[in-house]
Image (spheres, rainbow, N blue to C red):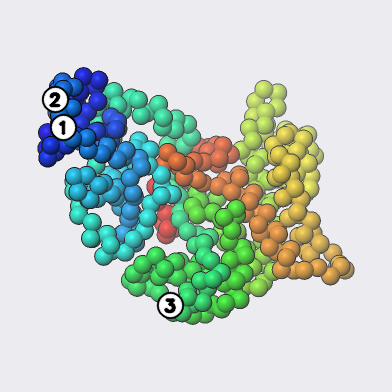
Amino acid sequence: MDKAQGPDGRKYIINHGKRFLIPDSITRNALGLKVDDFTQKTQEELDILQDGRSLVDIKNVRLIKSISNPTDVFAVLPFPELHKRHVPNPLTFNALGLSWEKIEGITQSEFDAIPTQPALVSFENWETDVQDAVKELLPKSGPKKAVIKFGVFGPIIKRTQIKDYLSYGDITADGIKDEFTHTSFQLGEFFQRQVTDLTVEILDRYVEATTIETHQGIVSAHPEISKYLVDPLVSAKRNFCLGDYLSCIAVCGVVGEMLAIFLWKTSSVTFKNHPITEEEEALLFQRTFERLMHERRLGVLKAFNRIPPEQQKKFSDIQGVRRSYLHFWARKPRNEKADALLVFRSAMSLFKQIVGVKLHDAGSIDLPPALQKYLVDNSAKLVPNDKKNWSE
């Protein structure tokens, strides 16, 4: 294959009498092609060649991973024949503008059927001018390192597939053959029991609690975030699914309190031109923020404009339901299941807004401002002791 450059600066691969346009410098660098590799051609020389299709813009290629080895991501390229190339590292993935949400998990046999060619060129080996241009698009703030965990809240499933998942029986890691058995395995991991111990009723409640709006696929693995927020929410969801609605309500109430304290710790409130101290909190509120009654905490956050109206309502919903069940001897009859579902969805929604980790279209991790500040301030405690289901 020859490489040519036209008078307008556009670059082509010449193959079997056809010219194939390389769409941009990022694609060219990822394929390991240097500017000096291209021979200058006149427009007349290019015009006598058949116009082949443009090479696929690298950020729009198909992305795959083998379910049996989910840590390695490959880009599927159609030229000169269909093949796959390994994306060498997260920095290169981000620089190419790829999206983590578009990665497909396929079976090992499907994966092996696509021929493999050398890996895409790592970002640090790209041409300097292209590196500089791409760096302008990469995130510039926040913690330099964040450890995350995948799948702690379980997978998203459809109600119509419940009986199918149960019919698979118990799935071990070695028994994962496709995306369906992988999801069945994840369900067993979430419930911490064999899939055969689950019922249609349990998974029906699981579907109710697992919506696109409230589900969180990845979370921070910071030990304190896990201890005070993630683990209690996982427990609350599991309790709801198992029909223990009162436990779900109680735990969500605790999560609501922890989220309010987290907001205050990361809110950068100043007093006399410096960050407020606990001693000054006690002077202003008669006790430190953390020792205030929860209703008073919410009032302080509202007064300092640290929670928008939508979040105020969710905090109030959680507090009101918890109080009605756990703080009064005599109470009016209520629908425990509906109330538990309300507070769990409210707690998960607040969790997503305040500390939810996202993978945005540029491929890098997106952290809310409060979580960014917390991770920077507590970087010494960044890596958890339990490394199950986590990645850097």
- Assign a secondary structure to mark 2: helix
Task: Identify the amino acid type marked 3.
Answer: Tyr
Task: Identify the amino acid type marked 1.
Answer: Leu
Q: Pick whichever, 6 or 300, lies toward us.
A: 6
Residue 282: give x, y in percent of width and height.
75, 38
Mark 1 and mark 3 in contact (Cβ < 8 Å)?
A: no
Q: Pick whichever, 193 or 262, lies toward us.
A: 193
Q: Quadrant of the N terminus?
A: top left
Q: Is residue 14 left or right of residue 383?
A: left
Residue under pointer 2: 45
Name the mark nearer the viewer: 2 or 3.
2
Q: Pick whichever, 240 or 255, lies toward us.
A: 240
Q: Which mark is residue 49?
A: 1
Name the residue rendered at 41%, 49% in the picture. 102
Q: Residues within 10 Å of mark 1 (few under 14, many from 20)?
A: some
Q: Residues within 10 Å of mark 2 (few under 14, many from 20)?
A: few
The reply to whether residue 221 is in sight is no
Q: Pick whichever, 362 or 83, lies toward us.
A: 83
- Assign a secondary structure to mark 3: loop
- Assign a secondary structure to mark 1: loop
Name the residue rendered at 64%, 29% in the picture. 275
Q: Is residue 62 left or right of residue 126?
A: right
Name the residue rendered at 27%, 59% in the picture. 111
Residue under pointer 3: 168
Mark 3 and mark 2 in contact (Cβ < 8 Å)?
A: no
Mark 2 and mark 1 in contact (Cβ < 8 Å)?
A: yes
Q: Quadrant of residue 60?
A: top left
Mark 3 vs 1, N-terminal side: 1
CA distance separating discs 1 and 2: 7 Å
